[in-house]
Image (tube, rainbow, N blue to C red):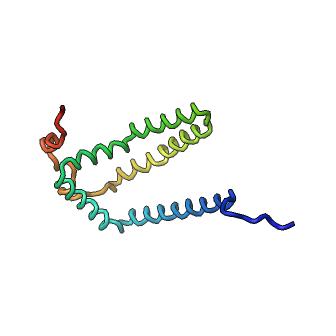
Amino acid sequence: MPLPRLTWDSALIRLLVTAVVANALAIGFVHLGDEVSEGETHGFDMAVLQYAQALRVGSPLYTEVLRDLSALGSTVVMTLLTSATCGYLWLVRAQVGALLVAVSIASAALLVGPSRQRSAERGRALRLPNSLRMDSVSRVDMQACRPSSF
């Protein structure tokens, strides 16, 4: 009996391609993390920060926009989004998916939290030149950036 011919529509081929792409991305992420921890991306990092500083000086509204965008990554917003996702999955009867999301987020918090704390204790935070620090913008400057109320 001849073997069945595999096509691109085959679930096995799709699974293998997905696994190869996921592994390639994971290896790339680990390699990038290694480069960052060795300080080899410092020149690129400083160039991006200087470009952002130039934008901030040129357009004060840019500072407000970036502050709002960075707030989306806060613990409170992430907790609300995770809770909403788990609740939605539970309501559409995807309890396994809801539990998977909840367990993955909780385990990541437990694994990453202590490592972030140790990193902060060792003083590995990014050292910025004074000209690039956000606290160099005075409160008066920020009040001038706010749109006028109607």
Q: Is residue 75 left or right of residue 63?
A: right
Give coordinates of residue 30: x percent, y percent.
Answer: 48, 62
The residue at the far right in this view is 1
Report the label total.
0
User: Which of the image's four quarters has the C terminus?
Assistant: top left
Q: Name the one closer to the observer, 8 or 134.
A: 8
Q: What residue is at 13 percent from the left and 44 percent from the top?
A: 141
In the rendered image, which quarter is residue 21 located in?
Answer: bottom right
Q: What percent of the width, then of the height, locates residue 128?
A: 24, 57
Q: Which residue is painted at 43% across and 61% down in the image?
A: 33
**Residue 39 percent across, percent down from the top left:** 35, 66
Query: Which residue does the image show at 28% across and 48% down from the upper left?
Result: 66
Query: Residue 54's x, y, as percent?
Result: 20, 58
Point out the image quarter for the N terminus: bottom right
Camera-side residue of 26 and 106: 26
- Which of 62/48 is in front? 62
Q: Residue at x 58, y 38 (%)?
A: 99
